[in-house]
Amino acid sequence: MRILITGGAGFIGSHLSDHLLKEGHEVTIIDDLSTGSILNIRHLKSNPKFHYYIDTITNEPMLAEYIDEADMVFHLAAAVGVNLIIEDPVRTIETNIGCTEKVLKNCAKKKKRLLITSTSEVYGKNTNEEFKEDDDLIFGNTTKSRWSYAASKAIDEFLALAYVKKYNLPTTVVRLFNTVGPRQTGQYGMVIPGMIECGIKNQQIKVFGDGTQSRCFCHVKDVVVALAKLIQSENTIGEVYNIGSQHEISIMSLAEIIKTKLEAKNFPSITIKKIPYSEAYEPGFEDMLHRKPNLEKTKNAIGFNPKRTLDQILDDVIEEKMAALS
Ligand SMILES: NC(=O)c1ccc[n+]([C@@H]2O[C@H](COP(=O)([O-])OP(=O)(O)OC[C@H]3O[C@@H](n4cnc5c(N)ncnc54)[C@H](O)[C@@H]3O)[C@@H](O)[C@H]2O)c1
């Protein structure tokens, strides 16, 4: 198969490229390197089945051409990361909605198989213990810019499902929960690489809020296998799926585990510092206390069962960040 990945030089897109090439596919990526990096795909450049274009998908004639040449399209390009979203909500909304609209329109012209990546953020302030795909989405006020990411991704979902109905476009929507692994940067507010980078460079791990909020972290290598299976199944067309881990951990416990692991690697005196949300992000910042996926639907569709533990995730990321030092 010839597969196109938008945002393919990003964290998840580059791992997805690795996986699809291993499966024997021909992979083309488009990325404007706004948050992605050429370093993420450096190891693939000499692979004759890998093609990369450094361009923006707002360049629609170019996008149309690459969609035309592909059998399947993964749409991952987006403005991602809490820091980026709060600093530049205009960019978040314009990128997330504008790019998705262009991808859908051009896939619809040629009836291409498409998968778009949404986010667990769309569940917003829902307080259910586990989030199911048909749960209500509950957002905060439009005066709080952090909700612009969730709202823009929800519009992407509405638009994608509307294209399925109106144009019979074979599309699947995936809501990714916290995905972690090598090549993810802490620069835009991602918690695990952020804590590890700060621990290594400044001997300090920052915990935003009181640290009782919990998250579930899934290894990117488990996630990309699931993305590939979902697009390869006809039964997932017109459906929404959660992908993530169900192993919940508080952010304070996570910081303590990272501290212990770094201290064992000769970073002897690491401190953990709590920073109020208002200082870390913006006054009135709202966070969700927990965010855990219900995975019944995804298990039934593709037998999804993430294999890698939090321990493996942390070891992989620490190893990568330490290698970058030398
Ligand atoms: N990492 C997570 O935990 C997580 C969680 C939920 C959802 N997601 C979703 O998964 C997808 C991939 O996220 P990621 O974590 O790999 O982030 P990332 O920032 O590493 O990847 C996004 C990529 O899109 C590229 N991009 C942005 N605008 C572009 C444009 N106009 N043209 C071309 N390329 C453009 C960026 O340069 C980057 O390489 C995103 O859609 C994101 O919303 C990620």
Image (spheres, rainbow, N blue to C red):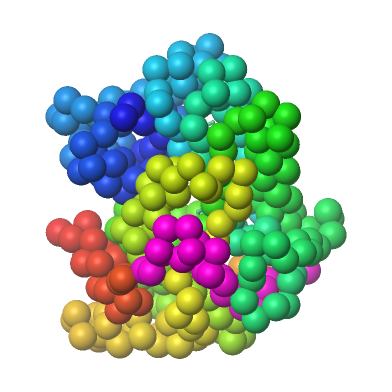
Residue 189 in sight in this render:
no
**Residue 57 image offset from top left, x and y in percent:** 52, 25
Residue 171 higher or lower than 308, as above or below: above
Specify the quadrant that holds the N terminus: top left
Residue 300 forms part of the magenta stretch: yes
Q: How many marks?
A: 0
The structure residue drawn at horizontal position 56% and vertical position 57%, both measured from the top left corner, is 241
The magenta stretch is 282-306
The structure residue drawn at horizontal position 62% and vertical position 44%, both measured from the top left corner, is 238
Q: Main secondary structure of the magenta part?
A: loop
- Work out whether residue 92 or residue 44 is closer to the camera in this orientation and state it: 44
Q: Is residue 161 left or right of residue 235?
A: right
Query: Residue 59: which quarter of the image?
Result: top right
**Residue 81 image offset from top left, x and y in percent:** 55, 54
Specify the quadrant that holds the C terminus: bottom left
The structure residue drawn at horizontal position 51% and vertical position 47%, both measured from the top left corner, is 235
Q: Is residue 272 left or right of residue 125?
A: left
Q: Is residue 60 left or right of residue 323?
A: right
Query: Residue 271: which quarter of the image?
Result: bottom left
Residue 289 higher or lower than 229, as above or below: below
Residue 60 higher or lower than 325, as above or below: above
The structure residue drawn at horizontal position 39% and vertical position 37%, both measured from the top left corner, is 8
**Residue 90 image offset from top left, x and y in percent:** 71, 39
Residue 108 forms part of the magenta stretch: no
Query: Residue 308: which quarter of the image?
Result: bottom left
**Residue 133 image offset from top left, x and y in percent:** 64, 62
Residue 127 in sight in this render:
yes
- Work out whether residue 251 or residue 200 is closer to the camera in this orientation and state it: 251
